[in-house]
Every structure is written in structure tokens, then in C-alpha cells.
Amino acid sequence: MSSTHDDHDAQPVTDRIHDNSWSANLEKPEHADDRQLVVDQALSAIEHTAPGNHVNLVTHANHGHPEGYLYDVLESEGGDDVEWEYIEQCGCGGHVVRVHVS
């Protein structure tokens, strides 16, 4: 997996490997109009999650249900190393997808 976003103004979603389960906040203002940033930082969050743990990807409401733009990427980039499940829509309108890393 690798992210390809060229916008260097956006803060990275994390800068360390998480050896625990955690949540990646992909609903900040910079994510509102940039679906590719959401996808790229979702992939980065997965890359920064140690095997045996999961990351909750909390996506921005502006992009709708992640099935329309994130699931295919998870399938093609994650392969057999990740499994994901849709958790819920947040009160703010965003969505939570839990990605288990093996």
C-alpha cells in the first residue's frame, strides 16, 4: 500500500506505528473537499497500524458512504493483509470503517 497525494500542506494523519487499536481522523477541514486526501491518508493510517490491531477510519461527511470510494481501494491495496467492516455513521455525518491489519 502506498499513498500518492501530492498536497504537502496537509498534516499527516500519524507519524508513528500504532501497536494498538486507534482511530484516524479523516474529517478535518482539509478533508472536506479532497476525497483523494481521505483515501491517501486512510492508506497511510493502515500502513501505520501494527499487525494484530485495527484502525478506525473516520471519514468526512462530504464524501458520502465510503463504499463508493474507499472499499475498492482497500480491496486492491490491502489484499489479504486487511479486513474491513463498516461500523456506523457518526452524528456529524461522517462514517467509520474499521480496518483489521494482519
Image (cartoon, helix red, strand yellow):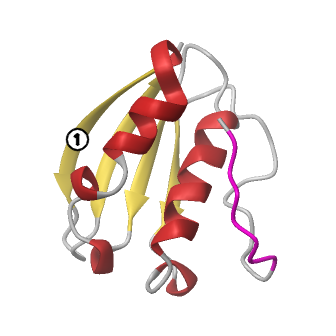
Q: Is residue 44 above or below residue 27?
A: above
Residue at horizontal 37%, vertical 72%?
60
Q: Residue 31: where, in percent of width, then height? A: 51, 78
Q: Which residue is mark 1?
A: 86
Label 1 Cα crowd, 10 Å radius (few <14 / some 14-19 / many 20+): some
Q: Does residue 101 appear anywhere in the picture?
A: no
Q: Residue 87: where, in percent of width, then height? A: 22, 43
State the quadrant of the N terminus.
top right
Q: Is residue 53 above or below residue 99?
A: above
Left or right: residue 78 versus residue 49 is left
Answer with the quarter of the image where residue 73 lies.
Answer: top left
Q: Residue 13: where, in percent of width, then height? A: 66, 60
Q: Is residue 6 above or below residue 72?
A: below
Label 1: element kind: strand
Q: Main secondary structure of the magenta part?
A: loop
Q: Does residue 88 appear anywhere in the picture?
A: yes
- The magenta span reads 2-8
Which of 71/57 is in front? 71
In the image, is residue 5 part of the stretch drawn in magenta?
yes
Q: Residue 65: where, in percent of width, then height? A: 21, 61
State the quadrant of the C terminus.
top right
Which of 87/4 is in front? 4
Left or right: residue 73 versus residue 6 is left
Q: Amino acid at mark 1?
A: Tyr
Residue at horizontal 80%, vertical 43%?
16
In the image, is residue 31 part of the stretch drawn in magenta?
no
Residue at horizontal 27%, vertical 59%?
95
Residue at horizontal 74%, vertical 77%?
7
Q: Is residue 34 above or below residue 55?
A: below
Left or right: residue 92 versus residue 70 is left
